[in-house]
Amino acid sequence: MSIDVRNLFNGKFKKKRIYLDFAAATPLDSDVFKKMEPYWSLHYGNPGALHTEGLFSKEALTDAREAIARAISVKPEEILFTSGGTEANSLAILGFTQALEERLKKEDRSYADTHFITSSSEHPSVLRCFSALESKGARVDFVDFNPHGLLDVAVIKKLLRKETVFMSCAYVNSEIGTVQPVSDIAKEIRAHEKKMGTHVVFHVDASQAPLYFDCTPGALGVDLMTIDGQKIYGPKGVGFLYKREGVSLEPIMRGGSQEFGLRPGTENIPLIVGMKESFIKAVENKDEEVKKITALRDYFIALLKKEIPQAILNGDQILRSPNNVNISIPGMDSEYLVIALDERGIAATTKSACLGRSNDAHSYVVASLYKKDEAVGDTHNTFAKSALRFSLGKGITKQDIRFVVSVLSHEVEKLDRLVL
């Protein structure tokens, strides 16, 4: 059966939709849209051209780069615009390794002489890059989260060795919303460097962070940082990579000399203008948003515990993003619940949207939190198969949350009766 999704939004269905998937994509801020509008058809020149139209677009590009750089206290030339978070992650990891490969050839060494660290619960755009590196012979440690959904700094410290050249992790996990100890990891990396006389490049995927956390690279201690426009009420199809001066990258695409020779192709000025506006607003409004959304999150969690006591919060309750509520309800089919909620006008999800509709439809992040116990069965799969992610954002109210919990509670009770 096909669904004409246009009917959901053209007034045929009068009831309000409650969107709780802000971690996947946010709506475009109306002020951001207004700033972008002139660059679609009025100021359409190619920023690489020398005529007036081109110079006007070039000025907009320069202004966006400088404004973002000021907001996070870095140099404008350390900001590289991309098509989004996935490309920024690829440019960071694969761009670094391509530059490394050239150096290894000159030194008559191979990938087998290198060591990388990441977590086993990263976004697919990170994990698949490291899998590709493994296939080339690089040694990669995929570190598991602890039961609270956090990386253990002591584990990272033990894994660091003389051959370690690169580490990557998310600032905020995209599925369970846990906030990783990025600054503490950076301190261990820098202490290791002094001890060994080597350098380890530290990349952080901060796509889920700007609305609620400080993304100043200097404060975090990172060399590379990914930001995605669609996560911060900006447009889809744009992001940026912060690259600290002195870090060597090679382009992963070939073509022109745009973005300091690291990202060929004509810059998309309307999207970059939108990226700038949304990022600046995120930085400026962060404190207010944290306070407001955290209160809603805690209310949501408390109500879930009261109305659905068997629901288990996945990941640490305190060290998590203000907008994330990820739960498992053992014995429930999360895909059924997502569909049932959607029929009542509620948008939620089971996992990261970037995992798609694969055969493995359940969250590997949630599964990793729970160990397999032969005595009681595959506990980790039980929790993964019943995982639901709700991510909050602008426009969500306590009334919305009460309705969501009421509908969810009803559906859980209905499934319980069917089982019995």
Image (cartoon, helix red, strand yellow):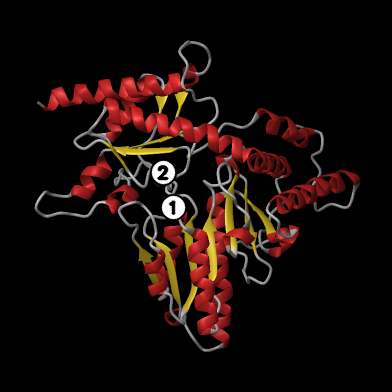
Residue at (32, 20) in percent of width and height: 406
Q: Is residue 36 above or below residue 346?
A: below
Which is more toward the observer, 51 or 248? 248
Q: Secondary structure at mark 1?
A: loop
Q: Is residue 415 above or below residue 52?
A: above
Q: Which quadrant of the figure has residue 29?
A: top right
Q: Is residue 402 visible?
A: yes
What's the amino acid at mark 2?
Ser
Residue at (12, 28) in percent of width and height: 419
User: CA separation, marks 1 and 2?
Assistant: 8 Å
Which residue extends farthest bottom? 108
Question: In the image, residue 398 lies at what x, y percent?
Answer: 45, 22
Which is more toward the observer, 218 or 382? 218
What's the amino acid at mark 1?
His
Question: In the image, residue 80 lies at what x, y percent?
Answer: 67, 57
Residue at (56, 69) in percent of width and height: 96
- Disc 1: CA contacts within 10 A as few (<14), some (14-19) or many (>=20): many
Question: In the image, residue 240 lies at what x, y percent?
Answer: 63, 52
Left or right for 33, reference 377? right
Question: In the image, residue 239 lies at what x, y percent?
Answer: 61, 48
Q: Which mark is residue 352?
A: 2
Q: Is residue 4 visible?
A: no
Residue at (26, 38) in percent of width and height: 386
Where's the C terminus, which quadrant? top left
Task: Look at mark 1 in the image and give the residue it sits on.
Answer: 123
Q: Secondary structure at mark 2?
A: loop
Q: Earlier in the sequence, mark 1 or mark 2?
A: 1
